[in-house]
Image: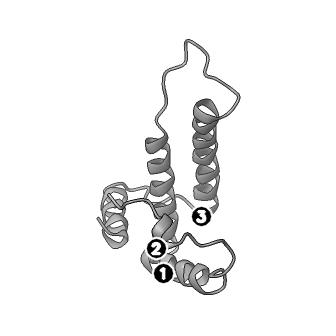
Amino acid sequence: MDLDQVQARVDAYIGQFQEGYFEPMTLVVRLTEELGELAREINHHYGEKPKKKDEPEGDIALELGDLLFVITCLANRLDLNLASAFDAVMHKFETRDKDRWTRISPADRPDEP
């Protein structure tokens, strides 16, 4: 599924409710909330704070999915195209930051799956 399809699918989902999209500020607050949930899972898996024994196991992939959903809602609410935004960001990294990091030589790259 490409980003245009993601945006269309979220729009179709939200479009079935009278309330529609939340206001942009509310979506940013929701984004912050979801990022906190992702941070908690990362901390439990890779950080120094283990889960309590009675806490259910979390899912990092689902937390990333929640972030993607809210980001998509915000983009749709603001009538922004995520594919275009992503292309612009990649262009920035591929030009402005092209020499910022030490490149891996082709011989040192791991095999592609």
- Using the image, tell me which numbered label, if any, was put on residue 87: 1
Q: Residue furthest bottom?
A: 95
Q: Is residue 96 left or right of residue 75?
A: right
The numbered mark, 2 or 3, whose residue comes first in the sequence reads 3
Per the image, label 2 sits on a secondary structure element best described as helix
Closer to the camera in the image, 107 or 44: 107
The numbered mark, 2 or 1, whose residue comes first in the sequence reads 2
Q: CA distance from mark 2 to mark 3?
A: 16 Å
Per the image, label 1 sits on a secondary structure element best described as helix
Query: Where, quadrant-wise, is the C terminus in this rendering?
Result: bottom left
Closer to the camera in the image, 22 or 54: 54
x and y, in percent, of residue 100 in the image: 69, 76
x and y, in percent, of residue 53 in the image: 57, 12
User: Do the CB atoms of the residues marked 2 and 1 lie less than 8 Å apart?
Assistant: no
Q: CA distance from mark 2 to mark 1?
A: 8 Å
Residue sitting at x 48%, y 25%: 57
Q: Which kind of residue does numbered mark 1 sit on?
A: Asp
Residue sitting at x 47%, y 72%: 106
Pointer 3: what residue? 24
Pointer 2: what residue? 82
Q: Is residue 60 left or right of residue 39?
A: left
The numbered mark, 1 or 3, whose residue comes first in the sequence reads 3
Q: Which kind of residue does numbered mark 3 sit on?
A: Pro
